[in-house]
Amino acid sequence: MADFFNAIRVYENEDGSYEQKVQQCEFDKLPQNNTLIKVKYSSLNFKDALSATGNKGVTKHYPHTPGVDAAGEIIETESTEFKVGEEVIVTGFDLGMNTWGGFSQYIRVPDTWLIHKPEKLSLKYAMGLGTPGLTAGLSVSELFLNDVKDRGSIVVTGASGGVGVIALTLLSRYDYKIVAVSGNEKQYDLLQKLGADEIIARDEFSDNLEKPMLKGEFAGAIDVAGGKILSTILSKMAYGGTVTCCGLVDSPKLNTTVFPFILRGIRLIGIDSVESDLHYRKKIWHMFANEWKFEFSSETLHEITLEQIPQHVTKILNGEITGRTVIRID
């Protein structure tokens, strides 16, 4: 093992700006956790871009190494459940937020954060899924558990983003009628290829009248937006419908009433992949390795290197990235 390794380090400058640098680091700079992993792949997420640009709601202290996802090989461990040489997946918990993250050739994390990589998943494919894949999987699973099939269409917001692309791909396998909501008109053809039966522009979807109840159109929804978009979804849910919420791209605020809940019996389920039950995570990863396994297209999966991260941080913040971006670390 080399004496040094490369990682992205984010620095806070005196003028309040933030700068990302690829830097050689010493191993004693890593946290003193019980498992050392050689990272082969990571992925770029919106939360990583926030961390890389100084969002104190995500990362409190700098310098810092972002990366909420990592997949690689165990080099050292004190664990009784995992062994040296095993390939593992790490997503969520505090990785890349306030703990040294996956934009690094090595990480040191607690073994309680690890998932045994399913045999049929490659490390690259696992990071093609990453946190958005896990989030989409948890969301789709909740729709299945609440039996929304044959009650109406399913609406997916942020459809050209990481969660949306994977959710569309999964739902299309089960013959759902899917309504995709997207602010990226250039990706409408792609959304149709992924299985969207109808596409609605984001600006046209929100109900500006903010009525608590509208015609019940949807049996289910996977929402990454919050704000007015989620309020509109709730007002348009059919009786017994289920909405999963996993983001706040539009706004963290929610203006609604109790009427859709008590008059139509709908459910609003929060999806959290950061602290979700480890056994539930394992189930979702094994689903992706088996009955949910699919092939990413060149339009939905992009590969970059560690050195290319800074320019892609800017792109994801500007909404210029479609689908998933994996980072080849090793």
Image (cartoon, rainbow, N blue to C red):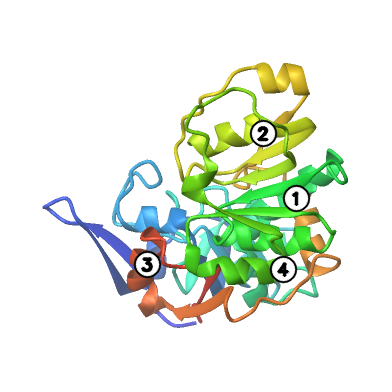
Label 3 is placed on what type of residue?
A: Lys
Closest to the camera, between mark 3 and mark 2, is 2
Q: Where residue 198 sits in the image (x, y, percent)?
A: 67, 57
Name of the residue lying farthest toward the left: 15
Residue under label 2, please give it.
Answer: 236
Q: Amino acid at mark 4?
A: Lys
Query: Which is more toward the observer, 11 or 209?
Result: 209
Query: In the image, what residue occupies the spot 59% across and 57% down?
Result: 159
N-term mark: 4 or 1: 4
Front residue (pair 306, 80) = 306
Characterize the local packing of mark 2: few (<14), some (14-19) or many (20 or more) Cα atoms within 10 angstroms. Answer: many
x, y (%) of residue 45? 49, 60
**Circle 4 or circle 2, nearest the eye:** 2
Query: Looking at the image, is mark 4 or mark 3 nearer the viewer?
Result: 3
**In this rendering, position of residue 98 left or right of residue 167:** left
Indicate which disc, 1 or 3, sits on the residue closer to the N terminus. Answer: 1
Q: Earlier in the sequence, mark 3 or mark 2?
A: 2
Distance from disc 4 to disc 1, alpha carbons, whole Å, reads 32 Å
Mark 1 → mark 3, Cα distance in angstroms: 28 Å
Q: Earlier in the sequence, mark 4 or mark 3?
A: 4
- Per the image, label 1 sits on a secondary structure element best described as helix
Find disc 3 in the rendering and name its residue: 315
For residue 44, above or below residue 132: below
Whichever of labels 4 and 2 marks the residue nearer the N terminus, that label is: 4
